[in-house]
Amino acid sequence: MLNAALRRVTADTGATLLDFAAHPVASDPRLWSEDRLHANSAGHERIAAALAHTAGLPGYDDSWTRPLTVAPRRRGHEVLRAELAWTRRHLLPWLARHLRGRSSGDDRVAKRPVPLPVELT
C-alpha cells in the first residue's frame, strides 16, 4: 500500500523514485544484515550506487542491478541452524514485545534530545 502510494505521488509530481525492492538483486540475503531488515555494508553500497544512478550522477550505471555471484550451496542442517538462530534472536523477541504492546524503541532516549544548530566546516 505504501509503495503504491509512493509510486502514485512520484508519478503525479515528477519526483524521482528508486524502487530498489522492485529489482531481483534486492532480495539477495547477502545484502542484508542478520536481522533481515537493515542493509549490511554490501547492501548500503548497492543502494548508494542505485541512488547515484537514479539521480543521474556521472560515472554510475545500472550495474547495481546485476545479481551477485552464485552463493555456495548450504546444507540443510546449516540452513535450519541459521533459521533457528534468527527466530531466537529476532522473531521471538519481536513477537514478545508486540504481544505486550511494546516496541524496540520504547524507553530509548534520543542521543541529542534538544535540536541544536549544525556547524558546517
Image: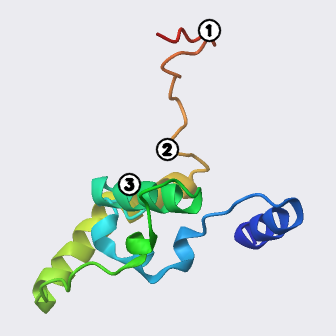
Percent position of residue 79, x then y: 19, 82
Residue 69 drawn at (x, y percent) = 21, 81
* Residue denoted by label 1: 117
Q: Upstream in the sequence, badge 3 or badge 2?
A: 3
Q: CA distance from mark 1 to mark 3?
A: 28 Å
In the displayed structure image, the side of residue 38 where residue 101 appears, left or right:
right
Q: Residue furthest right?
A: 12
* Alpha-carbon span between mark 1 and mark 2: 29 Å
Q: Nearer the viewer, residue 40 or 96?
A: 40
Checking the image for residue 97, the label placed there is none
Tell me which numbered mark, 1 or 2, is placed earlier along the sequence: 2
Q: Residue beneath label 2, please? A: 104
In this rendering, the label closer to the viewer, 1 or 2: 1
Query: Which image quadrant: the N terminus?
Result: bottom right
Q: Is residue 87 above or below residue 71?
A: above
* Camera-side residue of 65 and 77: 65
Q: Name the residue tied to disc 3.
A: 44
| Tags 1 and 3 touching, CB below 8 Å | no
Residue 91 lies left or right of residue 2; in this view the side is: left
Of circles 3 and 2, the one toward us is 3
What secondary structure is marked by label 2? loop
